Image (tube, rainbow, N blue to C red):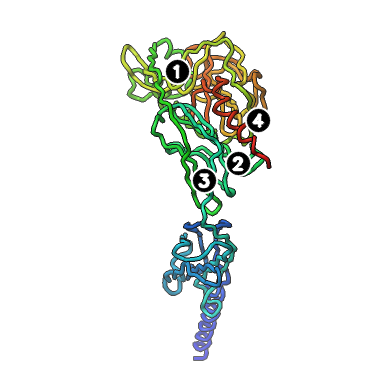
Amino acid sequence: MKKTKWWLFAIITVFIIISAGWILVVKMEGEKPVISENMPEFIGKSQTFTFTISDKRSGLRKVRSLLLKDGKQLNLLEENFEKEGFPAGGKFRETSIDIPVDLDKLAISDGVAVFELTVWDYSWRNWWHGNKTHIEKNLLIDSKPPDIEILTKAHNVNQGGSGLVVYRLSEPCPKNGVVVGDNFFPGYSGYFKDQSIHLAFFALDYTHGPGTKILLESMDQAGNITRAGFYHHIRKKNFVEDSIKLSDQFLGWKIPEFNIQAPENSTNPLLDKFLIVNRNMREENEQFFRTIGIMTEPKMYWEGTFLRLPNSATRAGFADHREYLYNGEIIDRQVHLGIDLASLEKSPIPASNAGKILFTGNIGIYGKTVVIDHGFGLISVYSHLSGIDVEVGQIVAKGETIGRTGTTGLAGGDHLHFGMMIHNIMINPIEWWDSNWIMHNVTDKLNDVKAFDTQ
């Protein structure tokens, strides 16, 4: 009997110790919930804050968000989370919450406000209220969108060409520039003494004819957006239609340069490989060019007319619409986004204008290529080179030799493929070879604004 009582006492004691330990370690854990936030310093007229909240130990119990302004305490969000049941704790260990802020509905004025966010967990601490994490942040409420003052007048743009607009913003705006169709061309400060004055080069894709939407857009630090139209005229351009005849000799010469496999059921592997190169690889290469424009610097490297390859003949034009023929049948259609210039074999290639070397290397159908950043989104491209004489990061002067013409890539003969870009759009280089066009469309505009740029 005594032995039985002793064992019963021991079991009860162990049970109490384990239970107490479990309560202290698990249910009364002291680890606070975690709030992952990247709060802005400004609130616009309407926006949504997104947070990730988590509690790995006992789970999320409750979240509450308040905005304090002008003596008012405004409840933005209050939510209770489900309990999974005893003894598991909260059902949610991590979740994302959206907190909408609409100034019109809240009826508060611009100025400094205090944002509060509090999260509780399912711990038994603090008399079963749980551990609590609380953050406070001062925010500047700004419901007024920025003003845009357009400082340039005429904006005549060719289809496939480029333009420049100069404008002044009433406040700092992290995003501003020109919207053309569905594309966005960023604007830059820093060229003028007055930092509120911005310039933006923009371009029309060869498909963008009259009627294409062109406007300025600016978003301030609070997310308020202003859009403003400006006078512009788009000149329609008709592009050359060209035919290229493919021979087995050409395919046997060029296609082995590309390390690709023909489809298993191919009856003409060289031709099928050509189509993969001319279609898929071309698109990959053009995507590369579309992304490289973001690496531009807000600095005007260039000056004056751009150079073309000396003593060269034009072999293909910008936006030539090509059809590819094999045994008399059309097998493909593509658009040529540059100008092909032919001179003597392995002719030295001058930098078309001063700039910074942005890229050197092999780009698929374009072969060995050099890309030069001329600043503010203006870029020149030199392809099919036999050799490259410059390195990335090098500053080059106008006319300095950067490489030599060649046949690398999908070139049928020794020549230079010369291209120019604004941000992410290939444009017609002919404009930039024309001193009158540059004077009327770029330098005169910049000089006119400089005349009253007194800061």
N-terminal of the two: label 2 or label 3? Answer: 2
Q: Secondary structure at mark 4?
A: loop
Which-is-in-front pick, marks 4 and 2? 2
Q: Quadrant of residue 381?
A: top right
Q: Is residue 250 above or below residue 426?
A: above
Say which amino acid is labelled 1.
Ile
**Secondary structure type for disc 1:** helix
Q: Earlier in the sequence, mark 4 or mark 2?
A: 2
Residue shown at 32% from the left, 17% from the top: 330
Front of the two marks 2 and 3: 2
Earlier-in-chain disc, 3 versus 1: 3
Labels 3 & 1 near each other (Cβ < 8 A): no
Residue type (three-letter) at the residue carrying disc 3: Ser
Q: Nearer the viewer, mark 3 or mark 4?
A: 3
Which residue is identified by label 2? 197
Name the spot of residue 125 as percent of width and height, x first.
55, 76
Tell me if label 1 and label 4 are in contact, CB under 8 Å: no
Q: Nearer the viewer, residue 208 or 414?
A: 208
Rounded to the nearest whole Å, what is the CA distance between mark 2 and mark 3? 13 Å
Residue on which the image places disc 1: 255
Q: Are marks 2 and 3 in contact (CB under 8 Å)?
A: no
Q: Callout 2: helix, strand or loop?
A: strand
Which comes before the other along the chain, label 3 or label 4?
A: 3
Which residue is the site of mark 4?
A: 393
The label nearer to you, 1 versus 2, is 2
Q: Give the distance between the C-alpha atoms of the residues marked 1 and 4, in whole angstroms.
A: 32 Å
Instruction: Give residue 156's position: percent from left, percent from top.
Output: 48, 29
Identify the image quadrant of residue 379: top right
Cβ–Cβ below 8 Å for labels 4 and 2? no
Q: Residue furthest top?
A: 344
Question: Please, what secondary structure does the residue beneath circle 3 have?
Answer: strand
Q: In this figure, which residue is indicated by the disc labeled 3?
A: 218
